[in-house]
Amino acid sequence: MELLSALERELKQLDERSLRRRRRIADTPCAPRVTVDGRDMLAFCSNDYLGLAAHPRLAAALQEGAALYGAGSGASHLISGHFRAHAQLEERLAEFMSPHLESARALYFCTGYMANLAILSALAGQGKTNADLFSEALNHASLIDGARLSRANLQIYPHGDTEALERLLKASTAATKVVVTDSVFSMDGDLAPLPRLLALCEQYGAWLVIDDAHGFGVLGEHGRGALEHYAMRSPHLVYMGTLGKAAGVGGAFVAAHETVIEWLVQRARPYIYTTAAAPALAHALLASIDIIAGDEGTQRRAHLQALIAQLKDALKLQRWQLWPSQTAIQPVVIGANDEALRAAAALNAQGLWVPAIRPPTVPVNTARLRITLSAAHTADDVAQLADAFNALEQG
Ligand code: PMP
């Protein structure tokens, strides 16, 4: 059939450009030591930053949640799918984030992707024809899609360029202005200049939407993420934290002033028109927030920071470039797609799993191996990785 052959031709082109992606099958829980495609590997690719995904306490809480609520929610939140565990989780998250938000309320979503679609379509869309949305150039795909869904007038400002953003804000006559940025950029690991962005939003009367997918649980003394890291507090803030990365389970939440959250409940289609996440997940997440907020969270964050410092110190690269990043995301930029794939394959042959990230996820000629560290790694794991990288680049 012609329709199929057209797709086959395009897939073949992906192969020719070393851009075809493939999935590997893991048979063991998410942890540094995994069995994947039948082989034992040491993995540096998950976003399980605190090493909670396979934590026995969370697995037990998930079972307890299933015993209490069964397997599924059965409906969307506004019909009959909103359970006690969802409500408890939202209260716990609102309380946790309250040092940074006035009249804080939180809303639990099935995924961060949907939370981002919801925030942008509800804040900058919904009949607000006069809305300007200012989006940072390296924002995550879900924010790009949320911007499209909102149908707001979209303006993209260059990475980290607050002066360019200020020029755009100054020129805007829109009734609703929304600035949106990742806090930690997922392919580069660097941090957005959030305090300056907030000052601009306060000056020009804009919302500041922060996607803290890679910061929540990891940044800040208590794990409250980028807001705690930068000691920020403002009614202009709309905060999105994901719960499938450092929190180790799945889903996401938006925290903001209670009026913003009520607006999302009433107007955000990606919230309203989907089946609620299993309440057992919310139940398990209550245990996860306890760990993040407690002494164990503090210890795990400290260990992760030590591993980041160790890796940066041990990597001695000349041709390839370790991107400047203070976070658990440490990209080694190689350049060409095929060279990045060869490097990933060579590490793979040694039992080390580091993913190659290629365009369109990153700009052309910046294909990279993205190392992500977790508190579940040991100093020996990191030493083994650094030695392998150093030998590979020289060899
Ligand atoms: N924002 C960023 C910056 C992300 O990296 C991701 C996940 N890769 C998301 C949002 C989406 O979150 P989720 O995986 O929960 O859909």
Image (tube, helix red, strand yellow):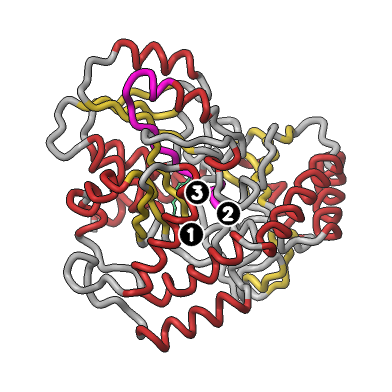
Which residue sits at x=37%, y=33%?
236
Asked if 256 appears above or below 297 in the picture, the reply is above
Tell me where the magenta segment starts and ends, as one range. Answer: 200-217
Q: State the image coordinates of residue 333 (x, y, percent, origin top left).
A: 67, 36
Q: Is label 2 in contact with label 3 (beta carbons under 8 Å)?
A: no
Q: Is mark 1 within 8 Å of ligand 1?
A: yes
Cβ at disc 3 under 8 Å from ligand 1? yes
Q: Quadrant of the N terminus?
A: bottom left
Q: As rendered, which of 190 and 286 lies closer to the eye?
A: 286
Q: Counting residues from the N terminus, which is met first, the one under dot 1 or under dot 3?
A: 3
Q: Does label 1 or label 2 sit earlier along the sequence?
A: 2
Camera-side residue: 267 or 103?
Answer: 103
Separation of marks 1 and 2 at Cα, in angstroms: 9 Å
Mark 2 falls on what kind of element?
loop
Q: Say few, some or many: other residues with alpha carbon within 10 Å of mark 3 (under 14 / 14 to 19 / 20 or more).
A: many
Please tell me which residue is depicted at 52% across the width and 62% down the height of the picture.
Answer: 23
Q: What whole-number distance in Å separates the C-alpha atoms at marks 1 and 3?
A: 8 Å
**Disc 3 element:** loop
Cβ–Cβ under 8 Å for marks 1 and 2: no
Image: 227 above or below 306 = above
Q: Nearer the viewer, mark 2 or mark 3?
A: 2
Q: Which residue is mark 1?
A: 243
- Alpha-carbon span between mark 2 and mark 3: 9 Å
Q: Which residue is mark 3?
A: 213
In x, y percent, where is residue 174?
22, 20
- Looking at the rendered structure, the kind of residue marked 2 is Gly
Q: Nearer the viewer, residue 94 or 367?
A: 94
Q: Amino acid at mark 3?
A: Ala
The crowd level at tag 1 (other Cα within 10 Å; few <14, some 14-19, many 20+) is many
- Image quadrant holding the C terminus, namely top right
Q: Which residue is mark 2?
A: 217
In the figure, 311 relative to 298: above or below?
above
